[in-house]
């Protein structure tokens, strides 16, 4: 639910719920109170009226049978009134149309109503004001009197006894409303805090952590839609911040590493160039042959520095994605074959045989930046040559295909790479200990190869067994 919806429903809940509860409980109160008072009171009333009737006219010995004149006696009338009052009932004595006695004020209309009600049957019902009564009528005339002059006693028993206490009812309803109002408020506040305040509190804590530089604690999405969106945005921000800090650290690391490696790797040839030049200046190279040898060495060292700088520049550019790749659809088999043709003579001079195998069934054309991919192949083959320790060196290039890619494998039977180094040889400046001490290189060849292969959306990895040989594998996505 969103925040607006929740606020509206919380407000509605705090008003509607107490009202509904109050109405329901009030109805229940009325029902139960009515039921209780009805049944008990009606029973008691019936008993009392029956007893009174018995006393008054029930038998030959009853008061009014023996002394009908008592009905006109005011003290008798008051006594009857007192007994009926217990039932909230009324006593009326009529003589013809005249009211001899009445425990309540009767209008002429009331008298007519009363008489009319009892015309048909004795246990009739009459309404006075809001109150309904059952009426018991007794004829208590003395001797023979005309129909119009009969003395009649009426006992009125309330049908709906007025035991329903309005004050109690209002108090009860008020209390229920108040309690349910407090309850509804408590519930809505609890949910409000659960869904909004506590997630906000967590967010605040997370923001604090970020401010303090702790970018590792994940921000969990919770709460209402808006709060969740806020969490998501903050989490995205945290990840980006973490990435950028990470990248910055990596660059910083790179920079340090580059500076130390460059200075170290460049220093070695430059120092020896300096040495040879000094030798020339001091006249140590005193014969033309010696001079030529010195100059050739200087030239070789200068070339070494040159390639190293080229490699470095290339690597730096690739790393910063500065030079765009130019892809061309290329027949991969021909491409590799041509490459091998070029290097074969040089390899043969080093006593290394180069073999080429293709398992491709059809002509495969894939998009390649030919110049750079050739650089990759050459870097790998150059390693196989450099780290070859067998007298009969063999380098095998093979070509395979899978459903989605073309795999180039360059396998040699050279020195192999120690297991601990295999995964690291694609890192820049990484060289295994033996290579570092014995063979020249800057440790950029495979790092450059990796950058280029990844620029082709491909993957490069190596499998090696020490003293047995190494396989470097490249997988390139097949063109559409
Ligand atoms: N075919 C291989 N046989 C044995 N070791 C290898 C082979 N290829 C790579 N290595 C190891 O991996 C390291 C990294 O190779 P990489 O080509 O990146 O650098 P390098 O050859 O030392 O220097 P550069 O290629 O820049 O002249 C090498 O120093 C070597 O220890
Ligand atoms: Mg190399």
Image (cartoon, rainbow, N blue to C red):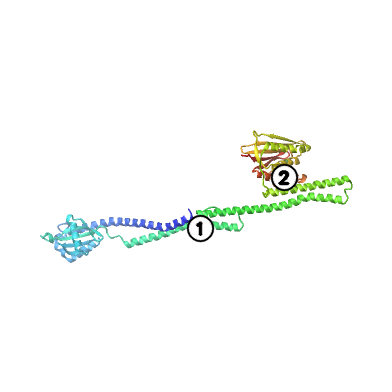
Q: Quadrant of residue 131?
A: bottom left
* Residue lying at the far right of the rendered structure: 287
Mark 1 and ligand 1: say if the CB distance to the nearest ligand atom is below 8 Å. no
Look at mark 1 in the image and give the residue it sits on.
197
Q: Position of residue 209 (x, y in %)?
A: 59, 57
Query: To which residue does mark 2 refer?
Result: 445
239 with respect to 188 (left or right): right
Secondary structure at badge 2 equals: helix
Q: Is residue 199 above or below residue 101?
A: above
User: In this view of the protein, which residue sits in the foreground, 332 or 326?
Assistant: 326
Count neighbours of disc 2 (C-alpha within 10 A) and say few if under 14, some if 14 to 19, many if 20 or more.
many
Select label 1 or label 2 by which is in front. 2
Q: Earlier in the sequence, mark 1 or mark 2?
A: 1
Q: Is residue 307 visible?
A: yes
Front residue of 232 and 295: 295
Q: Quadrant of residue 420?
A: top right
For this rendering, which residue is in front, 386 or 116?
A: 386
Ligand 1 within 8 angstroms of badge 2 C-beta: yes
Instruction: Residue at the far top: name it.
Output: 361
Q: Find residue 121 and report its horizontal and vertical position in percent.
A: 18, 54
On the image, the x and y values in percent for residue 372 come to 70, 43
Q: Quadrant of ligand 1?
A: top right
């Amino acid at each position: 639910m969103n925040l607006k919806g929740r606020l509206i429903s919380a407000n509605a809940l705090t008003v509607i719920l107490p009202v509904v509860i109050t109405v329901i409980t009030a109805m229940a109160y009325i029902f139960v109170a009515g039921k209780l008072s009805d049944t008990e009171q009606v029973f008691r009333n019936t008993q009392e009226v029956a007893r009174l009737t018995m006393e008054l006219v029930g038998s030959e010995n009853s008061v009014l049978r023996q002394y009908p004149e008592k009905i006109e006696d005011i003290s008798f009338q008051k006594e009857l009134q007192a007994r009926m009052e217990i039932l909230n009932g009324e006593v009326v004595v009529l003589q013809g149309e005249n009211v001899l006695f009445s425990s309540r004020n009767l209008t002429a209309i009331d008298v007519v109503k009363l008489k009319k009600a009892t015309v048909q049957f004795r246990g009739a019902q009459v309404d006075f004001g809001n109150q309904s009564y059952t009426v018991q009528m007794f004829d208590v005339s003395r001797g023979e009197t005309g129909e119009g002059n009969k003395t009649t006693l009426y006992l009125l028993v309330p049908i709906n006894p007025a035991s329903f206490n309005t004050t109690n009812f209002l108090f009860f309803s008020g209390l229920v409303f108040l309690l349910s109002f407090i309850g509804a408020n408590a519930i809505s506040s609890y949910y409000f805090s659960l869904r909004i305040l506590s997630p906000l509190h967590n967010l605040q804590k997370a923001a604090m952590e970020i401010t303090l530089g702790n970018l590792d604690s994940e921000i969990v999405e919770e709460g209402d839609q808006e709060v969740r969106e806020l969490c998501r945005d903050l989490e995205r921000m945290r990840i980006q911040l973490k990435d950028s800090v990470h990248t910055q650290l990596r660059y910083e690391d790179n920079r340090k590493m580059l500076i130390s490696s460059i200075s170290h790797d460049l220093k070695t040839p430059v120092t020896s160039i300096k040495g040879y030049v000094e030798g020339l200046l001091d006249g140590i190279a005193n014969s033309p042959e010696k001079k030529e040898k010195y100059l050739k060495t200087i030239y070789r060292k200068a070339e070494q520095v040159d390639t190293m700088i080229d490699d470095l520049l290339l690597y730096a550019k690739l790393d910063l994605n500065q030079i765009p790749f130019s892809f061309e659809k290329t027949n991969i088999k021909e491409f590799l074959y041509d490459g091998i043709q070029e290097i074969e003579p040089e390899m043969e001079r080093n006593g290394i045989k180069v073999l080429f195998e293709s398992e491709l069934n059809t002509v495969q054309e894939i998009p390649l930046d030919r110049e750079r991919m050739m650089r990759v192949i050459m870097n790998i083959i150059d390693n196989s040559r450099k780290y070859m320790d067998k007298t009969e060196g063999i380098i095998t290039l093979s070509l395979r295909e899978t459903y989605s890619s073309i795999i180039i494998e360059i396998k040699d039977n050279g020195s192999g790479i120690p297991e601990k180094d295999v995964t690291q040889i694609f890192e820049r400046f990484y060289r295994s200990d033996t290579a570092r001490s014995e063979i020249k290189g800057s440790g950029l060849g495979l790092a450059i190869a990796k950058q280029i292969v990844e620029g082709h959306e491909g993957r490069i990895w190596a499998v090696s067994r020490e003293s047995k040989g190494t396989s470097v594998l490249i997988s390139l996505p097949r063109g559409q």
